[in-house]
Image: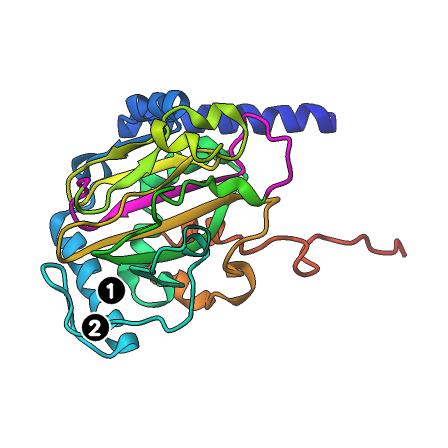
Amino acid sequence: MSESEAHESRALRARRRKKEEIDRLGLEPYVLELELNGYTVVPPEVTGVTEVEVDELTDLLLKKSEALVGCEFTIEDGAAAELDFGNYPGTLELISGAKPSQFQLMQLCTFDRAFRNLAVNPVSNVLMRHLIGWNEARFSSHNCFIKWQGDGYGELLGLHCDQGGVPMPWGRHSLTANCNWCLTEYTLDNGAFACVPGSHLRHSHPVLPAAVSEAIPVECPKGSLIAFHGQLWHGAYPRKSPGLRVTIANYYRHMSIAPQDDIPNHFPRELAEDCIDPKLFKRMAGFGNPYQSQVLPVPRVVR
Protein backbone atom coordinates (compact mmCIF):
# COMPACT_ATOMS: atom_id res chain seq x y z
CA MET A 1 0.00 0.00 0.00
CA SER A 2 1.36 3.42 -0.96
CA GLU A 3 1.62 6.29 1.50
CA SER A 4 -1.28 8.12 -0.21
CA GLU A 5 -3.43 4.98 -0.05
CA ALA A 6 -2.62 4.53 3.64
CA HIS A 7 -3.54 8.16 4.33
CA GLU A 8 -6.84 7.75 2.45
CA SER A 9 -7.55 4.60 4.41
CA ARG A 10 -7.00 6.43 7.73
CA ALA A 11 -9.26 9.26 6.59
CA LEU A 12 -12.01 6.81 5.59
CA ARG A 13 -11.77 5.03 8.94
CA ALA A 14 -12.00 8.36 10.75
CA ARG A 15 -15.10 9.41 8.80
CA ARG A 16 -16.74 6.05 9.44
CA ARG A 17 -15.96 6.18 13.15
CA LYS A 18 -17.27 9.74 13.41
CA LYS A 19 -20.57 8.81 11.75
CA GLU A 20 -20.93 5.80 14.03
CA GLU A 21 -20.45 7.95 17.13
CA ILE A 22 -22.80 10.70 15.92
CA ASP A 23 -25.48 8.10 15.22
CA ARG A 24 -24.92 6.22 18.48
CA LEU A 25 -25.24 9.37 20.58
CA GLY A 26 -28.15 10.80 18.57
CA LEU A 27 -26.22 13.97 17.66
CA GLU A 28 -27.21 14.47 14.04
CA PRO A 29 -29.59 17.42 14.79
CA TYR A 30 -26.87 19.17 16.78
CA VAL A 31 -24.24 18.56 14.11
CA LEU A 32 -26.60 20.10 11.55
CA GLU A 33 -27.06 23.18 13.75
CA LEU A 34 -23.29 23.52 14.09
CA GLU A 35 -22.95 23.46 10.31
CA LEU A 36 -25.78 25.94 9.64
CA ASN A 37 -25.62 28.28 12.64
CA GLY A 38 -22.11 27.79 13.97
CA TYR A 39 -23.41 26.83 17.40
CA THR A 40 -25.79 24.37 19.04
CA VAL A 41 -27.38 23.96 22.46
CA VAL A 42 -27.36 20.39 23.78
CA PRO A 43 -29.65 19.65 26.75
CA PRO A 44 -28.39 17.70 29.78
CA GLU A 45 -30.53 14.67 28.96
CA VAL A 46 -28.44 14.28 25.78
CA THR A 47 -24.99 14.99 27.28
CA GLY A 48 -25.72 12.72 30.24
CA VAL A 49 -24.42 15.29 32.75
CA THR A 50 -26.80 15.09 35.72
CA GLU A 51 -28.02 17.89 37.96
CA VAL A 52 -26.07 16.30 40.83
CA GLU A 53 -22.87 16.52 38.76
CA VAL A 54 -23.60 20.13 37.77
CA ASP A 55 -24.10 21.04 41.44
CA GLU A 56 -20.85 19.26 42.39
CA LEU A 57 -18.90 21.19 39.74
CA THR A 58 -20.49 24.46 40.86
CA ASP A 59 -19.72 23.83 44.52
CA LEU A 60 -16.07 23.05 43.71
CA LEU A 61 -15.74 26.28 41.72
CA LEU A 62 -17.35 28.43 44.41
CA LYS A 63 -15.03 26.96 47.06
CA LYS A 64 -12.01 27.58 44.83
CA SER A 65 -13.20 31.15 44.27
CA GLU A 66 -13.54 31.70 48.01
CA ALA A 67 -10.02 30.39 48.57
CA LEU A 68 -8.53 32.69 45.92
CA VAL A 69 -10.60 35.85 46.51
CA GLY A 70 -11.10 35.66 50.28
CA CYS A 71 -14.89 35.79 50.67
CA GLU A 72 -17.84 33.44 50.35
CA PHE A 73 -19.65 33.06 47.01
CA THR A 74 -23.21 31.84 46.44
CA ILE A 75 -25.19 31.47 43.22
CA GLU A 76 -28.11 33.43 44.68
CA ASP A 77 -26.24 36.41 46.12
CA GLY A 78 -22.83 36.42 44.48
CA ALA A 79 -19.81 37.55 46.48
CA ALA A 80 -20.28 38.25 50.19
CA ALA A 81 -17.99 41.30 49.94
CA GLU A 82 -17.32 44.10 47.48
CA LEU A 83 -14.80 43.06 44.83
CA ASP A 84 -12.19 45.23 43.16
CA PHE A 85 -9.68 44.42 40.42
CA GLY A 86 -7.68 47.57 41.11
CA ASN A 87 -6.32 48.92 37.83
CA TYR A 88 -6.54 45.60 36.00
CA PRO A 89 -8.55 45.86 32.76
CA GLY A 90 -9.78 42.60 31.25
CA THR A 91 -8.90 42.07 27.58
CA LEU A 92 -12.42 42.64 26.25
CA GLU A 93 -13.23 45.19 28.97
CA LEU A 94 -10.20 47.19 27.88
CA ILE A 95 -11.77 47.58 24.44
CA SER A 96 -15.19 48.57 25.82
CA GLY A 97 -14.08 50.61 28.81
CA ALA A 98 -16.53 48.70 31.03
CA LYS A 99 -15.65 47.86 34.63
CA PRO A 100 -14.83 44.12 34.88
CA SER A 101 -17.66 42.04 36.34
CA GLN A 102 -16.23 38.55 36.04
CA PHE A 103 -13.08 36.57 36.66
CA GLN A 104 -11.64 33.33 35.32
CA LEU A 105 -10.32 30.23 37.01
CA MET A 106 -7.70 28.39 34.95
CA GLN A 107 -6.48 24.79 34.61
CA LEU A 108 -9.67 23.23 35.97
CA CYS A 109 -8.58 19.69 35.18
CA THR A 110 -5.90 19.94 37.87
CA PHE A 111 -8.54 20.80 40.52
CA ASP A 112 -10.61 17.64 40.73
CA ARG A 113 -11.56 14.44 38.93
CA ALA A 114 -15.03 15.90 38.23
CA PHE A 115 -13.52 18.42 35.79
CA ARG A 116 -11.48 15.73 34.05
CA ASN A 117 -14.61 13.63 33.63
CA LEU A 118 -16.38 16.62 32.07
CA ALA A 119 -13.44 17.17 29.70
CA VAL A 120 -13.91 13.68 28.22
CA ASN A 121 -17.71 13.82 28.03
CA PRO A 122 -18.52 11.75 24.90
CA VAL A 123 -21.04 14.21 23.45
CA SER A 124 -18.84 17.30 23.73
CA ASN A 125 -15.81 15.47 22.36
CA VAL A 126 -17.66 14.08 19.34
CA LEU A 127 -18.98 17.56 18.49
CA MET A 128 -15.53 19.13 18.85
CA ARG A 129 -13.84 16.38 16.84
CA HIS A 130 -16.51 16.79 14.17
CA LEU A 131 -15.66 20.49 13.85
CA ILE A 132 -11.89 20.30 14.11
CA GLY A 133 -10.99 16.84 12.84
CA TRP A 134 -11.58 13.37 14.23
CA ASN A 135 -7.88 12.60 14.61
CA GLU A 136 -6.59 16.18 14.85
CA ALA A 137 -8.62 17.71 17.73
CA ARG A 138 -6.82 18.37 21.01
CA PHE A 139 -7.45 20.18 24.30
CA SER A 140 -6.41 23.83 24.40
CA SER A 141 -7.53 24.89 27.91
CA HIS A 142 -10.10 24.25 30.64
CA ASN A 143 -11.37 27.43 32.27
CA CYS A 144 -14.28 28.82 34.28
CA PHE A 145 -16.04 32.19 34.21
CA ILE A 146 -17.60 33.57 37.40
CA LYS A 147 -19.81 36.49 36.35
CA TRP A 148 -21.92 38.88 38.45
CA GLN A 149 -24.21 41.88 38.00
CA GLY A 150 -22.52 44.68 36.07
CA ASP A 151 -21.77 46.20 32.68
CA GLY A 152 -20.31 43.02 31.24
CA TYR A 153 -18.39 43.73 28.04
CA GLY A 154 -20.22 46.98 27.38
CA GLU A 155 -22.33 47.95 24.38
CA LEU A 156 -20.27 45.89 21.92
CA LEU A 157 -21.02 42.69 23.93
CA GLY A 158 -17.38 41.66 23.59
CA LEU A 159 -18.11 40.18 20.17
CA HIS A 160 -15.12 38.27 18.81
CA CYS A 161 -14.25 34.88 17.35
CA ASP A 162 -11.99 32.43 19.14
CA GLN A 163 -10.04 31.66 15.98
CA GLY A 164 -9.03 35.30 15.78
CA GLY A 165 -5.37 34.61 16.52
CA VAL A 166 -5.00 32.50 13.37
CA PRO A 167 -3.69 34.43 10.32
CA MET A 168 -6.19 35.05 7.56
CA PRO A 169 -7.55 34.04 5.12
CA TRP A 170 -9.59 31.40 6.94
CA GLY A 171 -11.21 28.47 5.27
CA ARG A 172 -14.36 26.62 6.23
CA HIS A 173 -12.45 24.42 8.68
CA SER A 174 -12.66 25.15 12.40
CA LEU A 175 -9.14 25.38 13.82
CA THR A 176 -10.48 26.00 17.32
CA ALA A 177 -13.87 25.28 18.88
CA ASN A 178 -15.47 25.77 22.27
CA CYS A 179 -17.74 24.01 24.74
CA ASN A 180 -19.53 26.24 27.25
CA TRP A 181 -21.09 24.23 30.06
CA CYS A 182 -23.83 26.36 31.62
CA LEU A 183 -23.76 25.54 35.34
CA THR A 184 -26.47 28.13 35.95
CA GLU A 185 -29.56 29.07 33.94
CA TYR A 186 -28.90 31.27 30.92
CA THR A 187 -31.39 34.10 30.38
CA LEU A 188 -30.92 37.57 28.94
CA ASP A 189 -31.07 39.15 32.40
CA ASN A 190 -28.64 36.52 33.72
CA GLY A 191 -25.99 37.53 31.18
CA ALA A 192 -26.58 34.99 28.42
CA PHE A 193 -24.16 34.01 25.67
CA ALA A 194 -24.47 36.34 22.66
CA CYS A 195 -23.76 35.32 19.07
CA VAL A 196 -24.48 36.09 15.44
CA PRO A 197 -25.91 32.88 13.94
CA GLY A 198 -24.19 31.80 10.74
CA SER A 199 -21.32 34.26 11.16
CA HIS A 200 -18.81 31.38 11.05
CA LEU A 201 -19.51 31.19 7.32
CA ARG A 202 -18.22 34.74 6.76
CA HIS A 203 -14.63 33.72 7.61
CA SER A 204 -13.81 37.08 9.16
CA HIS A 205 -13.58 39.02 12.38
CA PRO A 206 -16.80 40.72 13.58
CA VAL A 207 -17.59 44.00 11.89
CA LEU A 208 -18.31 46.37 14.78
CA PRO A 209 -20.53 48.02 15.84
CA ALA A 210 -22.82 46.71 13.09
CA ALA A 211 -22.57 43.10 14.30
CA VAL A 212 -24.22 44.00 17.63
CA SER A 213 -27.58 44.53 15.90
CA GLU A 214 -27.35 40.99 14.48
CA ALA A 215 -26.55 39.32 17.80
CA ILE A 216 -29.06 37.22 19.70
CA PRO A 217 -29.09 35.88 23.28
CA VAL A 218 -28.78 32.11 23.68
CA GLU A 219 -31.08 31.23 26.56
CA CYS A 220 -31.02 27.70 27.97
CA PRO A 221 -31.56 25.72 31.18
CA LYS A 222 -28.95 24.98 33.82
CA GLY A 223 -26.75 22.08 32.76
CA SER A 224 -26.93 22.81 29.01
CA LEU A 225 -23.94 22.64 26.70
CA ILE A 226 -23.33 25.39 24.13
CA ALA A 227 -20.88 24.09 21.53
CA PHE A 228 -19.63 26.48 18.84
CA HIS A 229 -17.29 26.92 15.88
CA GLY A 230 -14.05 28.87 16.28
CA GLN A 231 -15.13 31.45 13.71
CA LEU A 232 -18.53 32.20 15.29
CA TRP A 233 -18.95 35.84 16.31
CA HIS A 234 -19.86 35.64 19.99
CA GLY A 235 -19.66 37.41 23.34
CA ALA A 236 -22.09 37.88 26.22
CA TYR A 237 -24.81 40.18 27.48
CA PRO A 238 -24.32 41.98 30.80
CA ARG A 239 -25.83 40.32 33.85
CA LYS A 240 -28.65 42.51 35.16
CA SER A 241 -29.92 40.27 37.95
CA PRO A 242 -28.29 39.58 41.35
CA GLY A 243 -26.25 36.44 41.87
CA LEU A 244 -23.77 34.61 39.68
CA ARG A 245 -23.55 33.11 36.19
CA VAL A 246 -21.09 30.21 36.28
CA THR A 247 -19.69 28.71 33.08
CA ILE A 248 -17.05 26.12 32.29
CA ALA A 249 -15.31 26.76 28.97
CA ASN A 250 -13.56 23.66 27.66
CA TYR A 251 -11.65 24.94 24.65
CA TYR A 252 -10.30 22.73 21.83
CA ARG A 253 -7.80 23.23 19.01
CA HIS A 254 -6.47 21.62 15.87
CA MET A 255 -3.19 19.83 16.65
CA SER A 256 -1.33 22.37 14.46
CA ILE A 257 -2.45 25.25 16.73
CA ALA A 258 -0.60 26.04 19.96
CA PRO A 259 -2.67 25.37 23.12
CA GLN A 260 -3.60 28.17 25.51
CA ASP A 261 -2.49 25.94 28.38
CA ASP A 262 0.63 23.87 27.64
CA ILE A 263 -1.15 20.65 28.62
CA PRO A 264 1.12 18.28 26.62
CA ASN A 265 4.19 19.35 28.59
CA HIS A 266 2.93 20.47 32.00
CA PHE A 267 -0.25 18.60 32.91
CA PRO A 268 0.49 15.93 35.57
CA ARG A 269 0.34 12.60 33.72
CA GLU A 270 -0.92 10.71 36.77
CA LEU A 271 -4.07 12.87 36.90
CA ALA A 272 -4.96 11.82 33.36
CA GLU A 273 -5.34 8.27 34.64
CA ASP A 274 -7.85 9.44 37.25
CA CYS A 275 -10.94 10.00 35.12
CA ILE A 276 -13.70 8.01 33.43
CA ASP A 277 -11.82 7.71 30.12
CA PRO A 278 -8.02 7.96 30.56
CA LYS A 279 -7.36 6.84 26.99
CA LEU A 280 -9.42 9.69 25.51
CA PHE A 281 -8.07 12.24 27.98
CA LYS A 282 -4.46 11.37 27.08
CA ARG A 283 -5.23 11.49 23.36
CA MET A 284 -6.96 14.87 23.58
CA ALA A 285 -4.22 16.19 25.87
CA GLY A 286 -1.69 15.48 23.13
CA PHE A 287 0.42 13.08 25.15
CA GLY A 288 2.66 10.83 23.09
CA ASN A 289 3.42 13.28 20.28
CA PRO A 290 6.43 11.70 18.55
CA TYR A 291 8.15 15.08 18.23
CA GLN A 292 8.33 15.55 22.01
CA SER A 293 10.84 12.71 22.39
CA GLN A 294 12.49 9.96 20.34
CA VAL A 295 9.54 7.56 20.32
CA LEU A 296 9.67 6.66 16.62
CA PRO A 297 11.96 3.71 15.77
CA VAL A 298 15.40 4.15 14.25
CA PRO A 299 17.10 1.55 12.08
CA ARG A 300 19.80 -0.78 13.31
CA VAL A 301 23.07 -1.63 11.60
CA VAL A 302 22.91 -5.01 9.88
CA ARG A 303 25.73 -7.20 11.24
- Residue carrying label 1: 61
Q: Residue at x 18, y 74 (%)?
A: 81
Residue 138 place in picture, x, y as percent: 50, 46
SS for dot 1: helix
**Magenta segment, which residues?**
166-188
Residue 119 place in picture, x, y as percent: 35, 51
Q: Residues within 10 Å of mark 1 (few under 14, many from 20)?
A: many
> Closest to the observer: 7 or 262?
262
SS for dot 2: loop
Q: Residue furthest left?
A: 76
Q: Which residue type carries mark 1?
A: Leu
Q: Is residue 1 visible?
A: no
> Closest to the observer: 76 or 224?
76
Distance from Cα at disc 1 to Cα at disc 2: 19 Å
Q: Which residue type carries mark 2?
A: Glu
Q: Is residue 186 magenta?
A: yes
Residue 28 place in picture, x, y as percent: 32, 22
Q: Residue at x 46, y 51 (%)?
A: 95
> Closest to the observer: 218 or 215?
215
- Residue carrying label 2: 82
**Looking at the image, is 289 positioned above or below residue 80?**
above
The numbered mark, 1 or 2, whose residue comes first in the sequence reads 1
